[in-house]
Image (cartoon, rainbow, N blue to C red):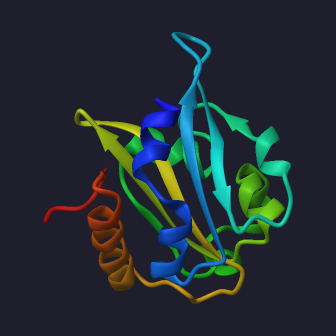
Amino acid sequence: MAGVMKNTINLDHIRQITHSDFVGMAEEIGMFDDVQVKWTHITGNMNNRYKRIAVGPGKGIAGVIYKTGKPWTVENVSSEIPLPERHQYPILINEKIRSFIAVPIIQNGMPEGVILIGYRTPERVSKSLTMTYIKNIQKACKCELGGVHL
């Protein structure tokens, strides 16, 4: 699965069209009861700590998006995610992300991965801009993203 999505999704191109600081792709790793979601491909990263992040479905940004199958836009991490809860999203801390769009990658009607578009300054995204970016990404990578109805 990892190779299939990576071959069709160019993270550097997504970073260009979204003018973002960071783009990451997370995918489900494991089988049956031992399923985790891990960041497998990254561009614009500050360090390699993302390689150690593995969360269960419903945990962390990737796990939440993977489980719900819906996009999540945060315009300002400081005001939208309470400080005591931020440790639940290690990619935000490790990469100093202050605003983001997270979108599920859909294959055969089910979430198969997550794309995180991150900015290191707040207020770089909005709900309306999210749909524009998602539509542009979907066209560019020829993939289906959750929450988009063209």
Where does residue 93 sit, x and y in percent of width and height?
80, 63
Q: Is residue 128 above or below residue 109?
A: below
Image position of 95 (left or right of 10):
right
Residue drawn where x is 49% and y is 45% of the image? 6
**Residue 77 figure quarter:** bottom right
| Percent x, y of residue 65 | 47, 48
Identify the residue at image location x=73%, y=50%.
Answer: 88
**Viewed as shown, does residue 26 lie left or right of 108?**
right
Looking at the image, the residue that sits furthest to the front is: 7
Q: How far across and down, in percent of the image, does residue 98 sit? A: 69, 77
Locate residue 116: give its quadrant. bottom right
Residue 123 appears at what percent x and percent y? Answer: 58, 89
Rendered residue at 26%/66% (across/down): 139
Q: In the shown orientation, is residue 145 left or right of residue 58? A: left
Q: Residue drawn 38% across and 47% down? A: 105
Using the image as rendered, state which of residue 81 and residue 129 is in the foreground. 129
The one of 96 and 108 positioned closer to us in this rendering: 108
Q: In the rendered view, tell whether residue 80 sits above or below residue 55.
A: below
Q: Is residue 46 above or below residue 41?
A: below
